[in-house]
Amino acid sequence: MADPIESSAPKARSSGLRDLASQPQLLSINTATVRAQGNLEDIFNACAEQGISAVSPWRDQVKDIGLKRASALVASLGLQLSGYCRGGMFTAADAAGLEAARDDNRRAVDEACEMGAPCLVLVVGGLPGALEAKPAHRDIAAARLQVIEGIQDLLGYASSVGMPLAIEPLHPMYAADRACINTLEQALDVCELLDPSGQWLGVAVDAYHVWWDPKVHQQIARAGAARIKAFHVCDWLVPTTDLLLDRGMMGDGVIELQALRASVEAAGYQGIVEVEIFSQNNWWKRPMQEVLHTCVERFKAVV
Amino acid sequence: MADPIESSAPKARSSGLRDLASQPQLLSINTATVRAQGNLEDIFNACAEQGISAVSPWRDQVKDIGLKRASALVASLGLQLSGYCRGGMFTAADAAGLEAARDDNRRAVDEACEMGAPCLVLVVGGLPGALEAKPAHRDIAAARLQVIEGIQDLLGYASSVGMPLAIEPLHPMYAADRACINTLEQALDVCELLDPSGQWLGVAVDAYHVWWDPKVHQQIARAGAARIKAFHVCDWLVPTTDLLLDRGMMGDGVIELQALRASVEAAGYQGIVEVEIFSQNNWWKRPMQEVLHTCVERFKAVV
């Protein structure tokens, strides 16, 4: 791989990090990474062909081929899940909307159970209506309160059926329309409020969303092994041309991925590393096998 | 003004906020807001015609008409400055780059003095080379250290000539290429480290950059009157279509501007409110007088 940017990799390499090159089973592909190139069956089969043993599917992709078919494929191909994407979107402009969100989140938990996921990832929602460019109000504190109440409610159900929840703090550029939990610190405050044990409520640490944060290493240490339910990677490109769909392949951007992995592992995380790339003008336009192969190579070399 | 979004304005209005509608002298126009429509002389004249008595010019616009001409115009039109844009960009890949940044920042301080600005705004820089899409490395902690050293050095010079510096924490989406100081908390940590007094080093609170932060009100209170050297407004649009050039006019987006102003004023800030909008596809395409008139109207109605 060509890497024109001076890397901090050697520093990280010598600090007791797990050797990913020899442990391919630690790689998971978030199925959004190749969502443009095929349906979930295509993606699962392609992963198996590439020797990729773990995946993290999206609900709409599962729905597309049917939940039973999706879970049967996971079993027959011997795939593991690193998460299920996604629950959340807890905010709403009225009681009916809150009720609908509540019901939909319980279904998401049920699906995660059926698929054998280790956690349901939560993208918590922003200002109600903002994603449809029709924000109902500007009161982000109120939205944040709805999110806490929504997670609290879901937590009761999720723990009763044995499904951990992982709050994914999203980059602050998504605060308005996708998630009003925007830092690890904020997410961990919610975790400590609602589940002191850490057994059922934790965080998904996605490098893309948290790399910029001057407190990221401190907060990863605070989270500890119990709270870190998932670790996602991709890269931040310079320039970034789209707020949502211009994520980079690991190694093509400026995130110190190994430094983040070092912190996550130092905190006790021994789980899977999930690759999640939304890339409208680059990776979504390439053949699926090329993208997956590149993910494998970069996983070994730069993550 | 059409405002389809339920506003939290009445709440703020009743809480002892300054009445902007009766104090037009509290409005400043950052000259980037109409940079596409004319040179600095055109902009200064148009502001004066609209009864706008304060401005915040950019260095490249000043250079364009000449520093002496610019400062003479400020005097002859009776304009006040709310700031001078900008110093910073302290990071560099080598010693020569650091030296050049040091020299350039001293010139920026001198220009700010000549123009009669109350402070020099600092956009501190990101990873060296990233703005040119050629990042020299990924070590954001090292970049942050360069920034602190750069500010420390400049502070000695700036205080010797009587020019306060205002660190502007930029939105985290600019961490890679424009500024690696990304929260008020982080900026205030630097302020307290380098200037315990608060006389010469403070912050520029720009609503666009900080509105998403769950700790923004807490950190504005922490800053207090001495540290808040400037207060900037515009709005966050949903959707936002460009990371840099799609800022909204106040009232067209989702930022609770009055809630932020309430916090800033509760912290003791009694200064000018500066409007700064970069809007490639909307406001930069409209006639200058229309844009300025809209700024005045929105300043009275929704800020």
Image (cartoon, coloured by chain):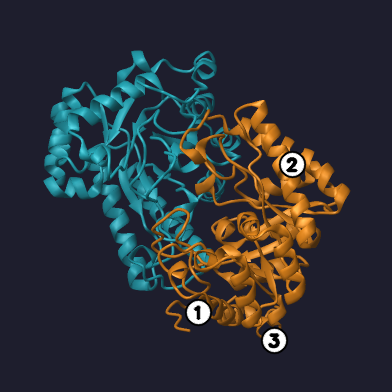
Chain colours: A cyan, B orange
Quadrant in which residue A279 is drawn: top left
| Picture coordinates of residue B240, whole percent (x, y) | 41, 60
Q: Secondary structure at mark 1?
A: helix
| Picture coordinates of residue B274, whole percent (x, y) | 65, 68
- Give the spatial CA distance, label 2 vs label 3: 38 Å
Report the side of B208 relative to A208 (left or right): right
Reply above or below: B77 against B223: below
Crowding near pointer 2: few (<14 within 10 Å), some, many (20+)?
A: many
Q: Amino acid at mark 3?
A: Ser
Q: Residue sitting at 62 percent across and 45 percent down?
A: B181
The answer as to whether the residues below labels 2 and 3 share one chain is yes
The residue closer to the viewer here, A201 or B47, is B47
Report the side of B19 relative to A60 (left or right): right
Determine whether label 2 and label 3 are within 8 Å by CB: no
Residue that badge 1 annotates: B290
Q: Is residue B117 visible?
A: no
Q: Secondary structure at mark 3?
A: helix
Q: Secondary structure at mark 2?
A: helix
